[in-house]
Image (cartoon, rainbow, N blue to C red):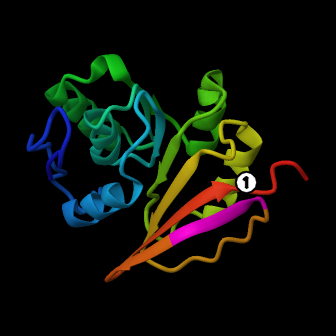
Amino acid sequence: MRIITGIKRGLKLETPESTEIRPTLDRIKESIFNIIHPIKQNSIVVDLFTGTGNIGLEFISRGSEKVYFVDNSKHSIDLTKKNIEKCKFEDKSILIKDDYATALKKIREDKSVDYIYIDPPYGEIDINNILKNLINSNIINENTLIIFEDDKDREIKIQDIDIVDERNYGSVFIKFMKRGNLWK
């Protein structure tokens, strides 16, 4: 696991010692960032269910101003903190050890974010509940790109969310979404 490009290109990150944390594979991460390239400079990012911090750190390496790393696992937060320190990105990183719903309330200070990466433990959390919480948190707008990773092609049942692209990488499904119907 490494930073693919940007100011920390090639830097190897700390990896989990157990299977409790499942980082996004480099080839999938590279494909995602190729799809969304170029990212908005000085963007604000939320890395929900951060695991190792792999995705959020890639955003910072590519020019993001601030990343909220959210996870309720102490092990994930500790590993993410080590990776933030290894990258020397402490000034651009905010660690939140909490469940996603509570964390979203804490993030409201930025009013809206540019990117949200959601990679929950496969099959354990309903994406539609997460999306409802995102809409209610008021941190997304029509320009916010939501990226969701899962092991199944989950159905999005929230009317206010539009799927703008979706990809399949073997057993990994990625959905790119934006908020629609903002003016209803």
Q: Residue at x 51, y 46 (%)?
A: 116
Q: Amino acid at mark 1?
A: Lys
Magenta segment's dominant SS is: strand
Q: Residue furthest bottom?
A: 170
Q: Position of residue 82 (x, y in %)?
A: 20, 31
Q: Quadrant of residue 140?
A: top right
Secondary structure under the numbered disc 1 in the rendered image:
helix
Q: Nearer the viewer, residue 39 or 105?
A: 39
Q: Residue furthest front?
A: 38
Q: Position of residue 24 (x, y in %)?
A: 29, 60
Which residue bears the numbered disc 1? 132
Question: Does 105 appear in magenta?
Answer: no
Q: Residue at x 17, y 49 (%)?
A: 4
Q: Is residue 167 above or below residue 81?
A: below
Q: Position of residue 95 (x, y in %)?
A: 41, 28
Q: Is residue 176 above or below residue 50?
A: below
